[in-house]
């Protein structure tokens, strides 16, 4: 016969141990889920950031050299690996007016480059000295002529391959990134960093349909 006076010390210890194990398991499951949620949030923010930036670049670069009056002398002015500059005549002196034969109106001269514009130590994708996307580790342009051959002669450019490597804002201590990233030509644009940041590479090829029109 067992005593009716209550639990023995042993029973209480066993119950506490079981309770502790259950709480530990619940916490561990919660922590794992929370962590994967944070990682997903970082990645989707990084991808949205990158996609929005590359969409704007595609749209603008497609207009490079736009010169409906043939008076503006619009074209690509810098065809560099990490900097691209170009002009286009897309409006007149006032908002909504027609192209007027110059490339001096708002938004008619554009430069894309990589620089730490906000000075926080991480490079950013910059359009005309304004940040377009932050935490960009690599920006690379490859220029192709009408035969699809790589060229560095601005006037011969007919299409542009853009490659961008974006990095998550926060490191993930349980992850090591040992990937290197290449452009569409297979050239390395970011070597393996072996750090704790997740990254995404996005590439696009834009046909500059206004280039090479006589
Ligand atoms: Ca103009
Ligand atoms: Ca920065």
Image: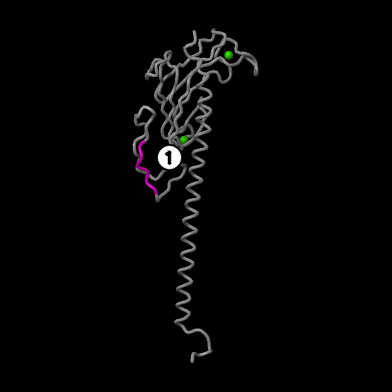
Label 1 crowd (10 A; few <14 / some 14-19 / many >=20): some
Q: Position of residue 185 (x, y in %)?
A: 36, 27
Our reading of the magenta stretch's main secondary structure is loop
> Dot 1 lies on which element?
strand
Residue drawn 58% across and 16% down? Answer: 90
Q: Does 22 appear above or below 73?
A: below
Q: Position of residue 173 (x, y in %)?
A: 40, 50
Give the extent of the magenta segment.
175-180
Q: Position of residue 161 (x, y in %)?
A: 43, 25
Q: Is residue 143 above or below residue 212?
A: below
Q: Is residue 210 above or below residue 6?
A: above
What is the count of numbered marks?
Answer: 1
| Residue 201, quarter of picture | top left
Q: Residue at x 38, y 18 (%)?
A: 152
Tell me if residue 179 is in the magenta stretch: yes
The residue lying at 43 percent from left, 46 percent from top is: 171
Measuring 56% from the left and 11% from the top, which residue is drawn there?
Answer: 68
| Viewer-side residue, 103 vs 8 | 8
Identify the residue at the far bottom of this view. 1
Whether the residue carrying mark 1 lies under 8 Å from ligand 2 is answered with: no
Residue 9 forms part of the magenta stretch: no
Coordinates of residue 85 in the picture (x, y in percent) = 47, 20
* Type of colouring: one colour
| Residue projecting furthest to the front | 147
Looking at the image, residue 16 lies above or below residue 168: below
**Between residues 109 and 202, which one lies in front from this camera angle?**
202
Which residue, given by chain and number where applicable, does mark 1 sit on?
199
């Amino acid at each position: 016969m067992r005593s009716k006076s209550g639990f023995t010390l042993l029973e209480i210890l066993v119950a506490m141990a079981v309770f502790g194990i259950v709480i530990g398991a619940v916490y561990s499951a919660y922590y794992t889920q929370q962590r994967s949620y944070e990682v997903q949030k970082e990645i989707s923010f990084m991808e949205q950031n990158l996609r929005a930036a590359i969409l704007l670049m595609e749209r603008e670069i497609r207009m490079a050299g736009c010169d409906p009056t043939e008076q503006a002398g619009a074209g690509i002015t810098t065809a560099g690996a990490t900097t691209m500059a170009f002009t286009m005549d897309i409006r007149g002196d006032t908002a909504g007016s027609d192209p007027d034969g110059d490339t001096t109106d708002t938004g008619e001269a554009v430069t894309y480059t990589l620089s730490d514009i906000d000075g926080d130590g991480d490079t950013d994708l910059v359009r005309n000295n304004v940040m377009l996307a932050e935490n960009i580790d690599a920006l690379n342009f490859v220029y192709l002529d009408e035969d699809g051959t790589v060229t560095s002669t601005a006037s011969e450019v007919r299409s542009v391959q853009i490659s961008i490597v974006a990095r998550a804002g926060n490191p993930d201590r349980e992850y090591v990134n040992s990937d290197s990233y290449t452009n569409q030509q297979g050239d390395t644009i970011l070597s393996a960093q072996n750090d704790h940041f997740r990254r995404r590479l996005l590439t696009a090829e834009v046909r500059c349909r206004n280039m090479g029109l006589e």
